[in-house]
Image (cartoon, helix red, strand yellow):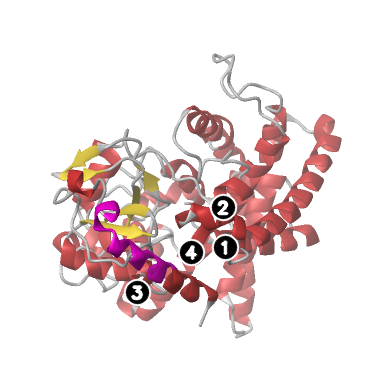
Amino acid sequence: MSLLALVLILLALLGSVGCLFPKLSRRGASRTLGKLPPGPRGLPVIGHLHMLGELPHQTLTHLSNIYGPIMSIKLGGVRTIVVSSPRAAELFLKTHDHVFAARPKTQASKIFFNGSKAVTLTPYGSRWRNVRKLYVVHLLNSSKIEQFKPIRTEEIGVTMNRLKTAAEKNEVVNVSKILIELFENLVYRMVFGRGKNDDDTRLKELVEEAVSISGVFNISDYFPLLAPLDLQGLARRMKQLSQSTNIIFEKIIEEHEQQKDHKSKDDKDFVDVLLSLENQSMDPQDKNSEIIDRSHVKVILLDMVGAALETSAKTIEWIFSEILKNPRVMKKLQEELETIIGTDRMVQESDLPKLTYLDMVIKEGLRLHPIGPLLVPHESMEDVWVDGFYIPKKSRVLINVWSIERDRGVWGDNTEEFYPERFENDNIDIQGLDFRLIPFGSDEEDVPVCIWEY
């Protein structure tokens, strides 16, 4: 039996004592009885944690089919609202976005992001707005994207030549490996201003583990009183990973500081841009605003590298696998490329708006295989009523994208089929404006970092 399972059983047994004191265990419940969204019956103390299983998004989808698209469960001591339909997602992420814009504080955000100094896990507020503005204005603006176009063209060209050479030699190709290497080279050149080296291999391993461990169920997040015990050893491992990545980032920053006088404006990578902002106020109009320091630079680099390294490669890998399993789709895609592009040149970024079937294939891949089946959790900043249900302050909100993008009421009965034509004559937006398809999250809170991936 795993340590986690043992702890949950012990907590459930201890919690059963509360049944002997019904007045205490029900204190405050009468205020919301019958008003909370429906949900399954849970166990004392641990709530519904024992029900999640290895694939929580699928378990939650099954439960939502029973209890509805707005469902209430308890994860330890945390009231959690599970949202599983486009209409419900719009209510939480658009209609009441001012209430649910916050992020819950987690042990991972405190350790990896130095008290949430990056965008991804930063609680809503002035810091979040200032850091988001920094991303949009200085790092992900149109001029920066255009500046890196030659890098993208060069790296994709190298990758295509590798595939062409392998095909001519009848060699077996590990597409997954090639895609990961492509995105590694793109990220390192745009963020660090150079190609991959030995430190980057180590950094990739550290970032992968950090992303993985951030997604692990952490008892400390749901039972804060147990946090000092670190029963799973997660805090200890997170601190080790954080120290190791800091050492690598510090070395990268020192290299940039030595070279800063020899770089023109057009040669500046993301590290150069961040260092140029060091010691400046996050918000010049607010005299009490945070000053950008070295710790901000490091956590933003971690945020960007972590967001970009694996997710894009995995998404393309899923789309490739679906194309290979569907010869009809492959043939139609080839015909479009041959008709519009021809066979004597590479596809250019300017060609993309003309490739309508390719656009449909990508959207269908994102629908079936979203980057994250559950969006980064939101948290309610105040008590609120949504669609007739009472949502208490500090409730955690899970948007089940996997369920939303398989909603039969939206996509029909063939939701498990890879069928790009479902997007024909439907210019659906994938950047958070259309809640039928939100692989990157909603427009205001989730998209800025994810657009960089796409």
In screen coordinates, is 454 left or right of 52? right
Q: Element at badge 2?
A: helix
Q: Dot 3 corresponds to which residue?
A: 331
Q: Dot 2 corresponds to which residue?
A: 108
What predominant SS class does the magenta segment belong to?
A: helix
User: x%, y% of residue 424?
Assistant: 22, 58
| Three-letter residue code for mark 1 | Ile
- What's the distance in space between the residues labelled 4 and 1, CA to CA? 9 Å
In screen coordinates, is 202 left or right of 288? right
User: x%, y% of residue 94?
Assistant: 27, 38
Where residue 217 is drawn, which disc sits there?
Answer: 4
> In the picture shown, does residue 355 fall above or below 130?
below
The numbered mark, 2 or 4, whose residue comes first in the sequence reads: 2
Are circles 1 and 2 on residues that touch, CB within 8 Å? yes
The numbered mark, 1 or 2, whose residue comes first in the sequence reads: 2
- What's the distance in space between the residues labelled 1 and 2, CA to CA? 8 Å
Q: Quadrant of residue 285?
A: top right
* Residue occupying the far front of the picture: 20
Q: Element at badge 3?
A: helix
The residue nearer to you, when weighing 78 against 349, is 78
